[in-house]
Image (cartoon, grey):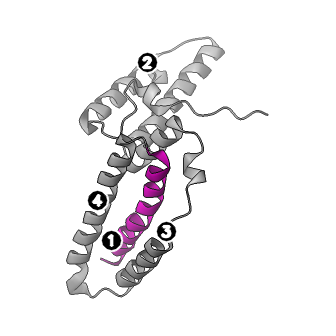
Amino acid sequence: MTHVPAPDPFTVFGVPRTLDLDARELERRYLRLSRECHPDHLRTQDANDCLAVLQRAAEVNDAWKTLRDPWTRAKALLEAESPGVLAANKKLDPAFLADALELAEEVAFVRPDHVGALRARLQQALDADFAALRADVGRADLPAAARRVHGAHYHKKALADLEHKA
């Protein structure tokens, strides 16, 4: 059986390949597309037509899951522009990894009265990661952008771990 790659989520939604998509417009497109291909609205007797409608609905739902999250959207953008770029750029700077380990320890042992400040610092780090990612993509430095996505994972994980503690 041959592997069929998933359709480009940007194409499914008819939007440009960019990191910056308007969240409200994206949701409006999702609702319109999901109504257009909802099986209840497209009653048909032909089994092939039913299968095509279900496949289109699955494509729309998968594209929505990808595009609504800026980080998942970034991964899709990078892979669409340069297939394999994420896998080829997983290795991160050892100094960054040491900092990420320290951050994980800080989250693990944070005092309750410091949670808010740490949460704000982590959110600032994620915002800075995304701004740098935007700059990398703007310069068409996709390997750097891929490393940035992998690095941001550590900040997202630290923030999620902190939220579980709160």
**Quick one: 33 or 22, which is closer to the camera?**
22
Q: Earlier in the sequence, mark 3 or mark 2?
A: 2
Q: Position of residue 159 (x, y in %)?
A: 35, 69
Q: List the residue tagged with mark 4.
A: 128
Q: Is residue 11 above or below residue 148?
A: above
Q: CA distance from mark 1 to mark 4?
A: 20 Å
Question: Which amino acid, by three-letter code, is at mark 2?
Answer: His
Displayed quadrant of residue 1: top right
In this view, the mark in front (1 or 3): 3
> Left or right: 125 with respect to 146?
left
Q: Secondary structure at mark 2?
A: helix
**Residue 41 shows which numbered tag?**
2
Residue to which mark 1 is pinned = 163
Vertical arrangement, residue 87 with respect to residue 15, above or below: below
Q: Name the residue beneath numbered marker 3.
A: 93
Residue 95 is a magenta residue: no
Sequence-earlier tag: 1 or 4: 4
Question: In x, y percent, where is residue 113?
Answer: 20, 85
